[in-house]
Image (tube, rainbow, N blue to C red):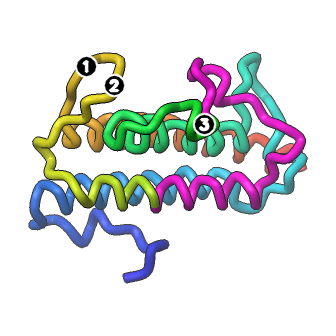
Amino acid sequence: MSSDDYRSEATLTGTEREQLEAFLHDNRLEILGVLDGLTDEQARRRLVPSLTSPLAIVKHAVFVEKVWFHVSLAGRSRAELGLPEAAEDSWLLTDDDTVESVRASYRAAWAEADEIAAAHGLDDLAQHNRRGPLTLRWIYLHLVEELARHAGHGDILREQVLAEG
């Protein structure tokens, strides 16, 4: 199975961890899919009043992966990782943000998150979150929820951008 294969259907009788990781993996693929077939200009197009664009969704997903795994679970600081303190600033695009660069950043954040999580059990506590201690299980569930929501937003925006031509 390649890293780009959907996995949830292969875990119908898997362990809890296998199922959580499969659903997270599949939603990560959906996030990357938000940029499929878009030029840099199309990916930056904002069709809503907020900062949300297809490219900003994937950039925000980089932030999400790093905040939950690199910061909350591994104890690194946002400053060390070059992350903004305010989540809303994770939607801001720079001139250097391209479809290619943001995709690569997301794949790297995802791979590092998987490495961090692999060293922990589902009941292990992430000690470095503003909410207080929470389990890796909670992080997995939250990421499935958040990435699915953003992938849905991205699907709609991508469809609209492609329809405009």
Residue 88 picture location, percent across and down: 62, 20
Q: Nearer the viewer, residue 72 or 58?
A: 72
Numbered disc 2: secondary structure? loop
Q: Which residue is tagged 3?
A: 60
Earlier residue among tags 3 and 1: 3
Earlier residue among tags 2 and 3: 3
Q: Is residue 138 above or below residue 162?
A: above
Magenta range is 83-111
Q: Nearer the viewer, residue 92 or 125?
A: 125
Q: Which residue is tagged 2?
A: 129
Question: Label 3 amino acid?
Answer: His
Residue 97 picture location, percent across and down: 80, 46
Residue 90 picture location, percent across and down: 64, 30
- Residue positioned 56% across, 37% down in the render: 80
Question: Label 2 amino acid?
Answer: Asn
Q: Which residue is tagged 1?
A: 132
Q: Calculate the distance from the C-alpha at mark 2 to the C-alpha at mark 3.
A: 18 Å
For the stretch drawn in magenta, what is the main secondary structure? helix
- Residue positioned 70% across, 42% down in the render: 54
- Residue positioned 14% across, 51% down in the render: 121
Numbered disc 1: secondary structure? loop
Residue 11 picture location, percent across and down: 19, 67
Q: Is residue 16 above or below residue 72?
A: below
Q: Calculate the distance from the C-alpha at mark 1 to the C-alpha at mark 2.
A: 5 Å
Q: Is residue 128 above or below residue 16?
A: above
Q: Calculate the distance from the C-alpha at mark 3 to the C-alpha at mark 1.
A: 22 Å
User: Does residue 4 appear left or right of residue 36 in this picture?
Assistant: left
Q: Residues within 10 Å of mark 3 (few under 14, many from 20)?
A: many
Q: Are marks 1 and 2 in contact (CB under 8 Å)?
A: yes
User: Does residue 157 appear left or right of residue 18 in this picture?
Assistant: right
